[in-house]
Image: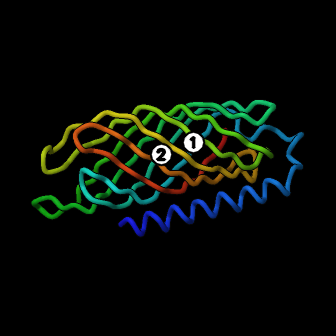
Amino acid sequence: MKKTMLIIGGLMFAAMIGTAAQARQDDSGANEEKRFSGLYGGLGGGFGDYSSGGDGGYIDFFAGLRQQTDSGLVYGIEGTAALIDTNESTAIGFDILDGYASIIAKVGYTPNNKVMWYGGAGYTSIDVANEQQTGGSADGIVFEAGVEYMPTSWFGLRLRGQYHAASDDADITTVGAGLLFSF
């Protein structure tokens, strides 16, 4: 599991370095419409380590509002809802399918109106199903870091990592990718 997380983290780092090199070469976006402003939404997926039930995949849906300044600073807020498949089976043989919901305040920077590095923190609520507790939820804080690439003003790609620190041994560490659409 740790080896897989390191490989995925290394791939995310390599993608961030590649987008940084492209951002340095392409400064033609100065007079374009600000690509990191307004309403947006999308879907993503990836892999996570769930302290309350093993590891497995997830899919998430997100929507947010953000504002890009003339200096390249981007700030906003985003809501996320995710479904988690923890590969843990119940007594009747079905996988446990839990989830989480988060609200995250974000701050980012775009040097060329196409690539943005960002970080954020906020509130998270995680469904809990483990040996100590069946059902219920755990509240806590979520931290996120990532990079987005907007090749057009309406479509983008995202790589990100999150850490959810919650009560009841429900911590989550995820890495994933997503598609986003600006409105």
The C terminus lies in quadrant: top right
> What colour-coding does the image apply?
rainbow
Tell which of 179 and 5 is nearer to you.
5
Which amino acid type is marked by label 2? Answer: Phe
Residue displayed at 71% across by 46% down: 154
Count numbered badges in the picture: 2
Q: Where is residue 11 in the image (x, y as percent from the top left)?
A: 57, 65
The N terminus lies in quadrant: bottom left
Residue displayed at 64% across by 31% down: 75
> SS of the residue at dot 2?
strand
Which amino acid type is marked by label 1? Answer: Gly
Residue displayed at 54% across by 51% down: 160
Q: Is residue 1 above or below residue 175?
A: below
> SS of the residue at dot 1?
strand
Tell which of 92 and 121 is nearer to you.
121
For marks 2 and 1, the one nearer the N-term is 1
Relative placement, left or right, of 27 versus 56 is right
Q: Where is residue 118 in the image (x, y as percent from the top left)?
A: 62, 42
Residue lying at the far left in this picture: please name it. 91
The image quarter in which residue 111 lies: top right
Q: Position of residue 85 (x, y in %)?
A: 31, 57
The image quarter in which residue 63 lies: top right
Contact, mark 2 vs mark 1 (Cβ under 8 Å): yes
Residue at image mark 2? 61
Q: Where is residue 43 in the image (x, y as percent from the top left)?
A: 52, 50
Residue at image mark 1? 41
